[in-house]
Structures are given as C-alpha cells and as structure tokens.
Image (spheres, grey):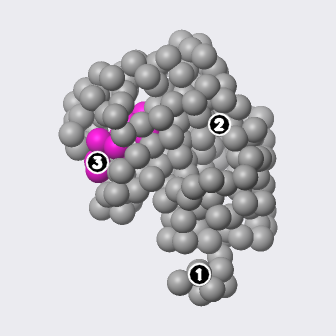
Amino acid sequence: MGTLRVIGGSAKGLRLKTVPGDTTRPITDLVKEALFNILGDEVLGNKVLDVFGGTGAVGIEALSRGAESALFLDKSREAVRIIQENLRATHLNDKAEVQHQDAFIFLAQAASSAYDLIYIAPPQYKGMWQKALDLLDAQPQRLSPDGQIIVQINPVEWEERAYQHFTVFDSRKYGDTLLVFFEHTQAENDITN
C-alpha cells in the first residue's frame, strides 16, 4: 500500500496517515482520482457521510474540494484517532465531525439529517455493504433527494439486489476495486422534486 495523499483542492498534495493492520480498506489514489473526476463539481457544498471512515481519505478529499461538511464514523478507536490527525494535518477539522461509533447502530437510528453523498467502504468480504444499504433503504430520507450513495467493494463481493428506494445508476471497476453508484429511484424523485 503506497502513501495516501489528498489529490485536489485546498489540501492538495498533503499526505494522510493510514490505519495500521488490515482492518480498513484504504482507497488508492488512482481510484480516488477517478471517483472525484466522476463527481466533479457535484461535491461543492455537499454534506458527506463517510460510513466506515478508516483513514478518512474520501471525506477529506471531498472537504478539500469544497464539500460543506463531513461526518466520519468508525468503531475502531485507532481509526478515529487517525481520521482526527488527518483532519488536523489538512486543516479541515472545522468542517468535520468524527464519531467513534458502529456504523450499523448509527444507520439504524432515526435519520436526523440528510446527506448528499454517502460513502460506504467497509472491511472486505463480510457482506457489510449490503447491511448498510438495507439500513439506508429503511430510512431513505437520510439521502438528500438528489444525493448519491457510493459503495466501494471488491468486484467479487458484488451481487445484484433490489432496493425499495434506491437504484444503481453507474458502476466503475478499477482493478480489484468496484465503485457502485446508487440514487433514489426515479418514482421517488418525481414525488420529492
């Protein structure tokens, strides 16, 4: 695993610390660059929820590129510490909140605010992305009407599933990383817009 860095925006070029061991799934710079090329200016002013925070690389990249705020969740005390250090190093901690919390407990709670970008990159091969999406599907108001959920998994973990409130609108494969993009189903968008 090479060094992680911020690719664009106010913190461009700054290195990020990684969480020791294999409990997190850090995004490679190549995949992160591709992701933010896809998102483009859509990230500006967004409220971001980084569900399995890990190093915080995705939420920090979003903040660096103009996202309004980011909430990072991780149940690992070490990961929370690393995210906080990375936020201080990039001078983005004033726009961020880091919670030492189990993502599933958070997602099962009543949604108190909506996010424009929800990023799900759980530890591999544990079926955690499906559980996170099931919980989001039970509370679709956690995603803003024009928002998107992005799942980062190994392609072998992917399985086609039907959700009541969300539909896949894009997916991109980069080596052993698959990004799957979800949005509210069209029928729901017609009602809310």
Q: What number is the disc on residue 167?
A: none
Q: Quadrant of residue 58?
A: top left
Marks 1 and 2 sit apart, C-alpha to C-alpha, by 30 Å
Specify the segment rendered in magenta.
Answer: 57-66
Q: Amino acid at mark 2?
A: Pro
Q: Amino acid at mark 3?
A: Arg
Write the residue at 24% across / 34% down. 11
Q: Residue at x 53, y 46 (%)?
A: 49
Q: Nearer the viewer, residue 187 or 179?
A: 187
The crowding category of the residue bearing disc 2, from other C-alpha atoms within 10 Å (few below 14, some 14 to 19, many at least 20), is many
Dot placed on the residue nearer the N-terminal end, 1 or 3: 3
* Mark 1 or mark 3, whichever is nearer to me: 1
Identify residue for label 2.
122
Q: Residue at x 60, y 45 (%)?
A: 120
Residue at point 29%, 41% (across, down): 64
Please tell me whether residue 113 belongs to the stretch shown in magenta.
no
Horizontal and vertical percent for residue 53?
Answer: 54, 33
Q: Position of residue 174 (x, y in %)?
A: 49, 47
Mark nearest the camera among 1 and 2 is 1
Residue picked out by circle 1: 192
76 lies above or below 182:
above
Q: Which quadrant of the view contains residue 139?
A: bottom right
Q: Is residue 137 visible?
A: yes
Left or right placement of residue 137 versus residue 148 in this view: right
Q: Which residue is mark 3?
A: 65
Q: Position of residue 109 (x, y in %)?
A: 74, 47
Q: Does the magenta portion include 63?
A: yes
Mark 1 residue type: Thr
